[in-house]
Image (cartoon, helix red, strand yellow):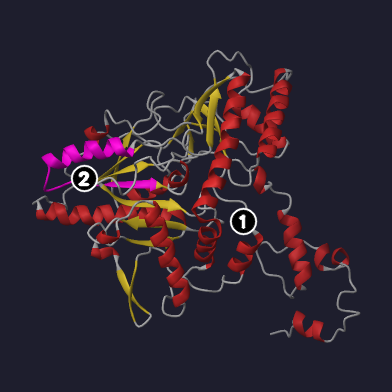
Amino acid sequence: MKEQTSTSKILDTMDEGTKYSTPIFGSEASDVAMPRTEMNDKPVEPRIAYEMIKEYLSIEGNATQNLTTFCQTYMEPMATKIMAETMEKNAIDKDEYPMTADLENRCVAMIGDLWHANPDEEPMGTSTVGSSEACMLGGLGMLFRWKKLAKDAGIDIYTEQRPNLVISAGYQVCWEKFCRYWDIEMRLVPLEKDHLSLNMDTVMDYVDDHTIGITAILGITYTGKFDDVQKLDELVEAYNQEHPKLPIRIHVDGASGGMFAPFVEPDLVWDFQLKNVWSINCSGHKYGLVYPGIGWVVWRSKEALPEDLIFWVSYLGGEEATMAINFSRSASQIVGQYYVLMRNGFEGFREIQERTLDVARYLAAELKEMGIFEIYEDASHIPIVCWGLKDDADVEWSLYDLSDRLRMSGWLVPAYPMPADMQDTTVQRVVARADFSMQLCIRLVEDMKKEIETLKQAKFVTGNTQGVIRTGFNHGGRAAVDNGDKVQTKAKTTQK
C-alpha cells in the first residue's frame, strides 16, 4: 500500500505565513474535476474542498425563489447555530442524551396542546423524519387497531380481501407508499371541480368492515384545501352507532395545516376536540418553521396507540416509550423545533403565519385581477395559491410556458396536472413561506405580468392545451405516465 501524507500533517509543517500562500483558485484541486465515481487519492485542503463544493452548488436554484416546496428555507442564525452544535447527538439514544429526549417530549406535549389533546387521556407522540414517517406510523396505528377489532368481531383478516384505507385522490405519495408496503387497498374518493377536497356526500360509500380508517387531509398538496374534518366526524359517528363492534376512526394528515390552523383559525374544529379523531401528524419542517427533516405524530390516548407499535427503552433510570420506523438520526431538528417553539411563542407563530397568509392573499387578488386565471385556491386556510387558465382565456400559451418563462427570472412556479379524474386540468401553485416577503411577492407579480406580455408576442409556444404532455412537477409526489395523449397520474379510483 502506498504511503500518503495527510493534509493535517502537511499543514502542521507550515507556519502562518505559508499555510494559505496558495490561492484557492490557484490550487491543483481547483484545476481538476471533483470526484464522481471514485474517491480522490489524496486529501484536499479543507478551505479548498469547501469552496469547490460551494461553487458547484451555487448554480442551482435559489431556495428563497423556490415557490414549489412547502419546506422551510430560512431559520434564524441562532437556530442554525444550536442545530449545528447538536448534529452529533443521536435522537434514538434516549439514555445517552436524556436532555435531548426531554426536549422531544416537551415538543410532543406543546404540539398536542395546540391540537387540544386532553392530558387526562394520556396522549402519546413522537418526532419523526418528516411527516411521511409520521403518516406511516399513523397508518400503522389504524391497521393494528383494526386487526384486533376485526378478530374480536369474528372477521377473517387473512382472506383475499385486503384491509383498506379511505382517502381523497389528492393524497400525498407517502400514503400510497404506506398502502403498498403494508398490502392495504387504497380507496380513493375522487376530486372534482365542485369537490376539491374530500367529498362528504360520498366518502362513507367507500367504507366497509375491512376499512382500517379514514384519512382527512388538512392542506391538500395540490391546492392547499382543507377536508371538512368536523363534518367527517359527524358522518363517522353516525356510522359507528350502527357498527359498534368495528368503529371507524379518523387520522388527520396535518402535514401542511397542522402547525398553521391553530394560530390563524383557532375556532376551526378539526383536531382532538372531535371524538373520532384519534391521531394527527404534521410537518415540523413546513409551517413548523424548521429546516427539512422533522415531523410529529400524536395519538389522542393510550387506547388510540396500539401496544404493538411501542418499544420501551431505558431513560433516566426508568423506561421511555419509543415509536419509530427509522432508527439512528441526528437530534438537531428536534432541538431546532424546540428552539422555534420557545423563541416565537404562540403570538410569534401567529404573527409569522398571518403575515405569510397576507402575502399569499395579495398574490391571489393580483392573479384574479389579471382576468385570465381561474383561482382554485386563494389562501383561504394556508398560504397556498393555486390557479389554472380560464376556458375563455383566449391565449395561445400554456401554464407550462409561463412556468418556463418565470424560471428564467429565478422563480420556480411549477405547472402540473391535477390528480385522477381531473388530470385534464393543468394548474400552477405557489407556496408562500416565512421568507417570502411582500416585497418579493410584488416582484413575482411584476415578473409574471412581464412574462405574460412576452408570451403574447411569442411566435413559438406549446399552445393552450390542458393536459399537454410535459414533465411538470407533480405535487402528489407521484410519477406521471405518458399515455400518448395526456398526462395522467398512476393513481386509480377503487370503490366498493
The answer to whether 84 is drawn above or below residue 171 in the figure is below
Q: Magenta residues?
A: 229-253
Quick one: 320 or 212, which is closer to the camera? 320
SS at mark 2 in the image: loop
> What residue did someone put label 2 on?
248
Residue placed farthest to the left in the image?
Answer: 154
Question: Magenta span has 247?
Answer: yes
Is residue 490 in view from this perspective? yes
Quick one: 302 or 14, which is closer to the camera? 302
Residue at horizontal 60%, vertical 17%? 371
x, y (%) of residue 292?
Answer: 54, 56
x, y (%) of residue 160?
Answer: 19, 47
Rendered-image quadrant of the N terminus: bottom right
x, y (%) of residue 47?
Answer: 78, 69
The answer to whether 323 appears left or right of 243 in the picture is right
Rendered-image quadrant of the C terminus: top left
SS at mark 1 in the image: loop
The answer to whether 474 is drawn above or below residue 86 in the figure is above
The answer to whether 115 appears left or right of 29 in the picture is left
Q: Sequence-wise, which precedes: disc 2 or disc 1?
A: 1
Report crowding for label 2: few under 14, some 14 to 19, many 20 or more residues within 10 A (C-alpha): many
What amino acid is labelled 1 in the image? Met
**Mark count:** 2
> What residue did someone put label 1 on?
75
